[in-house]
Image (tube, rainbow, N blue to C red):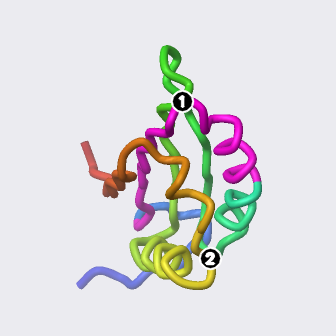
Amino acid sequence: MSPIRAADPLDESMAVTVLLELKFKPDSVVDAREVFGKALEATRSFAGNLVTKVIVDETDEAHWIIYERWESVEHDEAYRAFRAGEGKIDDLPPLLAAPPVKTRYLDTEI
């Protein structure tokens, strides 16, 4: 029988990575920077968020990836519920050239 280990707040063994791909209308990039500058403050301070970064395609400034690291799937799900409800980014849809694509990745032992 293996011993039960105490929870370690620095242990990321249950952490997940989320990539959110966003494609904006070319004339909306300046507005997108403003909208996300504000919106990502809430993301970064949301319970369970370990890191949130925005990476931009070097050849297309309207193509972004939001890189998020969460303590657990449950933390990510709570955040998604927040964004679907009271934290919805109402200014986002008119800026988009295509629907956002979210992919969640689990860590492996590889």
State the residue in front, 49 or 40: 40
In-image side of 67 versus 41 (left or right)? left
Residue receiving disc 2: 87
Is 109 located above or below residue 62 in the figure? below
- Between label 1 and label 2, give the one nearer the viewer: 1
Q: Position of residue 102 (x, y in %)?
A: 36, 55
Which amino acid lies under the numbered mark 1 shown in the image of this protein? Answer: Pro
- Looking at the rendering, which quadrant does residue 92 occupy? bottom right
Q: Is residue 4 visible?
A: yes
The question of residue 20 being in magenta is answered with yes
- Looking at the rendering, which quadrant does residue 40 occupy? bottom right
Write the start and end of the magenta stretch as one range: 14-37
Name the residue at 44% across, 63% down.
15
Disc 2, SS: loop
Disc 1, SS: helix
Of mark 1 and mark 2, the one earlier in the sequence is 1
Q: Residues within 10 Å of mark 1 (few under 14, many from 20)?
A: some
State the residue in front, 43 or 61: 61
Separation of residues labelled 1 and 2 (CA atoms)? 25 Å
Q: Position of residue 75 (x, y in %)?
A: 50, 76
Is 20 located above or below residue 81 in the figure? above
Residue receiving disc 1: 26
